[in-house]
Amino acid sequence: MISGCQNNKEKLILENKISTAIPPKNQSVLDNKKFSIEKVSRSKINLNKKENKIKQKDNYVIFEFKNERLLQGRDKPKFTEKTKTKKALSAVFKMLGQNLSLSNDNLNLNSNGEISLDNRYFDIKKDVTLYRNILAFLPLTGPYSNYGVKTRKALDLSILNSANHKIKIFYFDTGKNINQINISKLLDNINPSLIIGPFRREVLLDIKPIAKSKFIPILTFSNDISLRENNIWSLGFSPEEQVKSVISCALSYGYKNFGLVAPDNLYGRILTNASIDLISDYKNNKYDKILLNNNQINNKSKLFSILKSFLKFNENQTLHTRFDSILIGGSKEFILEIAPLLAFFNVDSKYVKILGTEKFNTKEIKNEPSLEKAWFPAIVSKNEKIFKLYWQKIWGDDVNYFSNAGFDSGSIGINYVNNQKDGSSFLKNISGPITGLTLESGGYVKKPINVMQIESLGKLTNIKKCSNFKN
């Protein structure tokens, strides 16, 4: 408010804002919700409500971390992970239906509320034969631990929702020293009916011969489809599957001249070779490729010269004319290095279709201006919205493909163990309740792969003509 010097002048009001009391926000108590997985292939998830039987005041835990988190200004994932106490997790188990394989002792909860991910692998109780066991090989420590911990959380939820007190999941940390001697001893002690994991192909190569000798099925998250066979299913999103979906989509839209840019390593060669196989099926199509090593990428003047020659850059032309579609494969850093340079040499992503892999599905890449209108493949889970709400109420962080596929692998595994008398035939044509991925004979897995287009501000739209490519 500004007041003049003379009292007879009216006051000039710049802003007149009436304060109103903010009504208190109702606290929400976590409902007791369970996924019904009597039939794993069910297309809908039914949430069954039970009467809350927690009557003691000390055990009444309200999961309302949001307001407190905002007051303290902490990141959501870190805050919820640090504040989950033993009492809070115990309340979750009671509300969801506690299972013997996830008792507090088995989870190894410390007094400070943190979860110890180290198990005494060979300190197995004598009554282990009374249970039907699932053995999970996950990277709980090391460079891939973020994937492993997320998958373990998903498996925890699947076993809790099964309400089956005769099934246990044992976790082995593949982030530490692992060899065939340990694996053989582990399988002899636990005698698992099913193996879930691992992520890395090197570990799978050690597990595979021992599991085959014992006729133990494997649901692995490795994306190396060359290792799949009868009784070994690959749930990972392989480079070949990614390329097949996005290149096939481009071909269906009439693109004919392809440029392929990838790193000079095994991953890059897999991407380019798979792309060439598809493009070569059409006589009138053309392609050219470059594989860039680290020295070329780090030497900016050399990299400029290579790309300029590859694109046949002409300063007198305002738009690129050699390729109508360019595939960029590689890590996030590789993509963010190459894409702006392509734009510098007149490759406008609105006129030249930029194709990518699932690596494009990150915030940094989706917000990169030179990649607007680019296409990339993504697995779109059919029931992710419902599962996302359920997951966030329990764990507080976001879901991803490994949380969804992890829950599905646990659900499929539990149902297989319950129906083990039917043998491996039970695992054929069975679908996961969240992702909708379907196991087939020979280790093949159908996945709901859609091609997405990056719009402004990082938004995504579905290319309808290329929806539901299945490999």
Image (spheres, grey):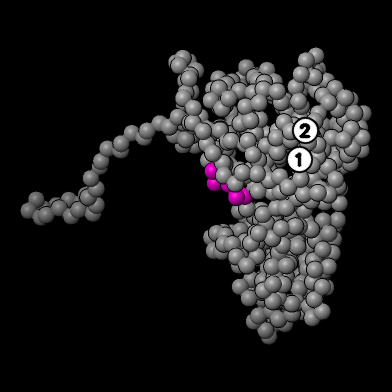
Image coords of residue 185 (percent x, y): 89, 25
Kind of residue sitting beneath label 1:
Phe
Q: Is residue 53 above or below residue 15?
A: above
The question of residue 20 being in magenta is answered with: no
**Res. 344 in view:** no
Q: Is residue 32 above or below residue 453?
A: above
Left or right, residue 389 beside residue 8: right
Left or right, residue 454 beside residue 280: left
* Pointer 1 local density, CA inside 10 Å: few below 14, some 14–19, many at least 20: some
> Where is the C terminus found, in terms of image quarters?
bottom right
**Res. 449 in view:** yes
Residue at x 83% of width, y 73% of height: 280
Circles 1 and 2 in contact, beta carbons < 8 Å? yes
> Residue 420 bears which disc, if any?
2
3D distance between C-alphas at marks 1 and 2: 8 Å
Image coords of residue 265 (percent x, y): 85, 57
The residue tagged with tag 2: helix, strand or loop?
A: helix
Image coords of residue 267 (percent x, y): 82, 56
Q: Which residues are magenta?
A: 381-386
Which residue is under mark 1? 426
* Pointer 2 local density, CA inside 10 Å: few below 14, some 14–19, many at least 20: some
Residue at x 64% of width, y 19% of height: 104
Q: Is residue 293 above or below residue 202?
A: below
The residue tagged with tag 1: helix, strand or loop?
A: helix
Q: Nearer the viewer, residue 281 or 317?
A: 281
Choose the circle earlier in sequence order: 1 or 2: 2
Residue at x 61% of width, y 73% of height: 350
Furthest-front residue in view? 422
